[in-house]
Image: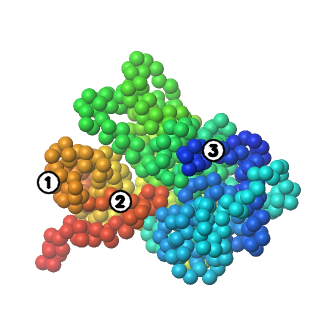
Amino acid sequence: MFDLKTVNDVFGMVGSRGDKVAMLWQDKSGTWQPITSAQFYSRVRALAKVLQEWGVGKGDRVAILSENRWEWPVTDFATLAVGGIDVPLYATLTPDQVGYMLRDSGAKVVVVSTKDQYDKIVGAGELPELQHVVVMDAGAFGNAESFGALMHGADEIKGSDAGFDALVGEARPEDVATLIYTSGTTGEPKGVMLTHGNLASNVSLSTGPLGFTDRDSCISFLPLSHVTARHTDYAFMCHGMRLAYLPKFDLLPAAMKAVKPTVFIGVPRVYEKIRQGVEAKSAGSAVKKAILNFALKVGKANREATMRGEGHSGLVWGMAHKLVYSKIREAFGGCVGTFVSGGAPLGMDTAGWFADAGIRIMEGYGLTETSPVIAVNYPSAYRIGTVGKPLRNVDCRFAEDGELEVRGPSVFIGYWKKEKETKESFTEDGWFKTGDIGNIDGDGFLSITDRKKELLKTSGGKLIAPQPIENKLKANTMVSCAAMVGDKHKFACVLISPNFAALEGWAKGQGIATGDRAVLVKDPKVVAMYQGIVDQVNGSIAHFETMKRMTVVPDEWSVEEGEMTPSMKLKRRVVEKKYEREIGEFYTDEASSKAS
């Protein structure tokens, strides 16, 4: 537990550790290079001086458009040091989206990582408030400033600076620290205003019971533009952990082998992909599949002990561990002791599969508007299938329709320049409406069942929560993502986005051509295989929830193509619009019956 008042208190802790290695980054050769606490302090101080010279002061906005690299937290803390407000932007945004957020926030400075990101600024249209562009990569970029040049000589400056420390100490809990634009699963992005006090109150309580120490390490690969990654990095800095910054997700497997982190933080999609990778390796061999099934059966028989955090022994467990469990842990680098999931619902199928492999995943829950953590599982208070118990400074209650409402010091102060939307997000007595449906059991564990706006209501009046059912589908190696539809219709149907790596491997074994994905997904054998997956899930849910029809789409949904948010949540409205024709075909006979 920590007693933080502002985010600048986090920087004070990091900068005070002298020659201790605080961060790692990869150079062009792929070698991991260290950054000490003293170097980090000096770099933040150097950039803060430049920002002051440019006239950036209290309340001014500095945008960051970058993948995860050491320059990201330097820019973050330098902005906060001078009293500014940082505006993190996802590296996957389009020029139009970047332009909207820069204009809406009125950013005076934007710091970008690469030429690709710089080009987005160039293509973003008129940016009347923007005065300075800084590029992290070396090279000439128009009138942009070089981040490296701004850092020149910083590492040679030794010791602390009383004037700079005093400036850092001027931050107050009520000051806005950051403006984070929501990922926009529905509607126009809104800038969430989080104060120093919001963020500090959350960091102070969220990770203490996880028992982290300065001997721990973690790879920072979830986008720092997302509040979950930002929050966990702040918390890890407080614990004195070593953070390895990774700019590209596809570098993660190699990074885990090299860094060998002791803590792993991932969104559910990362865990799902690792599971699918393990299952795919065993799919082509009857022997390997039998070994995996044997190990998972052993694990399931011992699941309760795993959930309690107890160790396992015995010949059978030892055999299963050697053959399977150790290989799964090796996918995470081999040294991870604590696994955490957040950003989206994990799903009982995925949580259960890992539990049967001897891995307890500490699932948590929160929103950008709550800084973010509302609840989290801990080793001492763990229940699979829930998101843990609410933090002690967060009050929870439920509206008549089951929507979770919260209040506490971590709840945001409002949306940037959107008074109407801010007012609508709170109840008349001041509780924030999360938009999530859930419940708290008799032991105090919170479960989230679905998004209120995403519930499907059939024409017969039945409410269907799609996420748990979609998670069951995604538990199959062949399914990358799924989207249930059926609101205002007689029955539910589903669109399935395949895991094409697994599908194409299976198809080749069946003698099916894989060159054209549009043709592949219409092949009768492929359709029958996916129908079998749907039928299996239908057998485990209520009759009114069953998916009466399905179609396999020729696309693997992604952040880049716009169907997923950067935190890997489904953009349901985008998918429904994109596949309007396919959805219409589900209900053609329904339309005919209505017409008659």
Give percent across and percent down for residue 378: 56, 40
Are circles 3 and 1 on residues that touch, CB within 8 Å?
no
| Color scheme of the displayed model | rainbow
Looking at the picture, how far across and down is residue 585, in whole percent? 20, 68
Alpha carbon distance from label 1 to label 2: 22 Å
Q: Residue at x 20, y 46 (%)?
A: 508
Q: Amino acid at mark 2?
A: Trp
Query: Mark 2 packing: few (<14 Cα in 10 Å), some, or many (20+)?
Result: many
Q: First in sequence, mark 3 or 1: give its number.
A: 3
Q: Position of residue 297 (x, y in %)?
A: 34, 29
Image quadrant occupied by the N terminus = top right
Residue that numbered label 3 is attached to:
33
SS at circle 3: strand
Q: Secondary structure at mark 1?
A: helix
Quadrant of the image containing the C terminus: bottom left
Q: Contact, CB < 8 Å: mark 2 with mark 3?
A: no
